[in-house]
Structure formats: structure tokens, C-alpha cells
Amino acid sequence: MINFLEAFFTSPVMMGALFPALLIAVVTSSMSMMVLAHRLSFLTVGVSHASLAGLGIAVTLSLPLLPTAAVTAVAVALLLALMPSRQGINEDAGTGVLFAGSMALGVMLISNANSYEVDLFGLLFGNILTVSEQDTTWITWGSVFVLLALLIWAKSWWSMAFDMITAKASGIATSRLRLVLYGVIGLTVVMCVKLAGIVLTTGLMVLPAACAWFWGRSMFSLWALSLTFSIIGTLGGLMWSYQYDLPSGASIIAMLCLLFIASWLISWLKHHVFEVSHDF
């Protein structure tokens, strides 16, 4: 075990991936609480898949991948935030429409690109091991923006999640902050593409808080637990990937799923076995 840890932490490839991976873990675990509280899991699916259009545009026009995808994802997220006010269509239907249309556009654009210009497997399933210095810089600045947004508006978003009417009556600009929340989620989703890819990004945006939800009660305790689960899942997944030569993104999501199953099982045992035994 000691030899494995020494090899892992001295590997130049893993050390190059560790900082951006942990930074993404911090950001996604923090936003994960808001995604679950506002019931926006399907939004992360739609926005992550819609970001393929931005990646296709970036490949076609030789633009930076992540910033171009971020602009597309934020635009799609804002459109989804506005769409429920349109008569005759709800948010779920809007997500499906934009998800399918953007994905189709991205596939068409990428299909015309040179196979050497785009790593399709990496885009779909992530590969943090190939992160470039430019990617790391972009992820760092994106993380700073998301964490600042959380620092400023987290309490308001939390209030809106559980009682929109009271939040509005207390003076919170709910319509404006809802748009900001959707935009920040869109930005966060794109930051995950390098780690988990378009297909698996939703796992990073949902699983940390889903694990914490079994144990936390307050916003702070949920955040601390979500952060802990996210870091454990990311580190464990990267080590799993290193040991058995597995895709890093899939390994991280699988590790988070195992943590969720363990949390659910322990919680179930606590409530249905130990409490029953105390009654006797």
C-alpha cells in the first residue's frame, strides 16, 4: 500500500491532474447542494449534453474548447430558466428540446472535424489526465467565479429552494437570482467536462450532495459532508484508475456511486435495525 501511494503521488501525470480534479471536486460538491435542493438534476443532464454544441463550434472555428463550451452551456441554461414563463411548454420539455437540438448540432460539427483534432472519447467520458496548462488556468478562474457566487448568494438560493413565496416576501430578488443560479450551474457543468465528460458530468453534480443528504441537516453541514464525499470520491477514483488503468472519469463516478450506496445502506440500517433494537 505504501509503495502504491508513493508511486501515485510521484507520478507526474497524476500530479498534473490532481490539482484541477480536486478543484472541480470542491466546486461541484458545493453546487451539488443547490442542484438537489432546487430539483435541477435533469437540468445538469440537458446542459452537459447541450455543451457538445459549444465544443463542436470550438473545433470547427479553432476556438478554445472549454470557454466556448461554457458560453454555450450558460446560454442554454439561461434559456431554460426563461422557458417556463412561455405559454405551452414547461422546463422538462424545454430541456429535452434544447438537449436534443444542441447535441445534434454538436455531433454534426464534430463529425466534420479531423479525428486528430478532437478526442471524442475524452469529450464524452472525460480524461483529466490530459488536462493542459490552459485548461487548468480556465478551471481555476471558473472555480473562483462559482465559489464567489456561492459565497454571495448561497443563503438566498437556499431560502428560495424551500419556500419561494417567503423568500420573495423577504425582499430576495427571486427571478433575477434564479437566472444567476441557472447560469452558474451551466458554468459548473462545463468545468466538469474535462474530468467526467459530457455523459458522466451529472454524477459529479448530484452524487456528493445525495450522499450528504442522508446525514446533514443544515446548509453548512450538508456542504461540509458533500465536500468530504466529493474529495474522497475523486481521490479514490483517481487511485482506482491509476491502479487498474481505467478511465479516470468513470472511476470517480463509480467511486461516488459506491459512497452513495454505502451511505444509503448505513442510514437504512440505522433507522430500521438499530432503532428497532433500542425499542426492545
Image (spheres, helix red, strand yellow):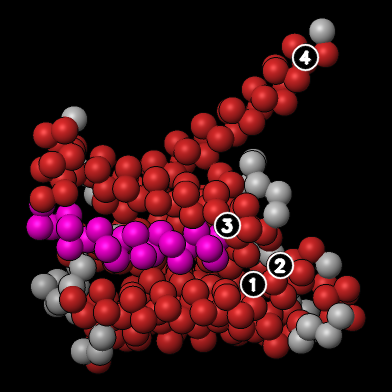
Side (left or right) of 268 relative to 88: left
For label 3, the crowd category at 10 Å Cα-Cα, with few meaning under 14, some 14 to 19 and many 20 or more, is many
Side (left or right) of 182 relative to 122: right
**Residue under label 4:** 278
**Residue under label 1:** 154
The amino acid marked with disc number 2 is Trp
What x and y, as percent, mark residue 32?
55, 60
Q: Is residue 88 magenta?
A: no
For label 1, the crowd category at 10 Å Cα-Cα, with few meaning under 14, some 14 to 19 and many 20 or more, is some
User: Could you tell me how far apart the alpha carbons at marks 1 and 3 are, in whole angstroms?
Assistant: 11 Å
Instruction: Using the image, determine if residue 267 lies above or below residue 87.
Output: above
Residue drawn 22% across and 61% down? 17
The answer to whether marks 1 and 2 mark residues whose Cβ atoms lie closer than 8 Å is yes
The amino acid marked with disc number 4 is His
Q: Which residues are magenta?
A: 11-32
Q: Is residue 250 visible?
A: no
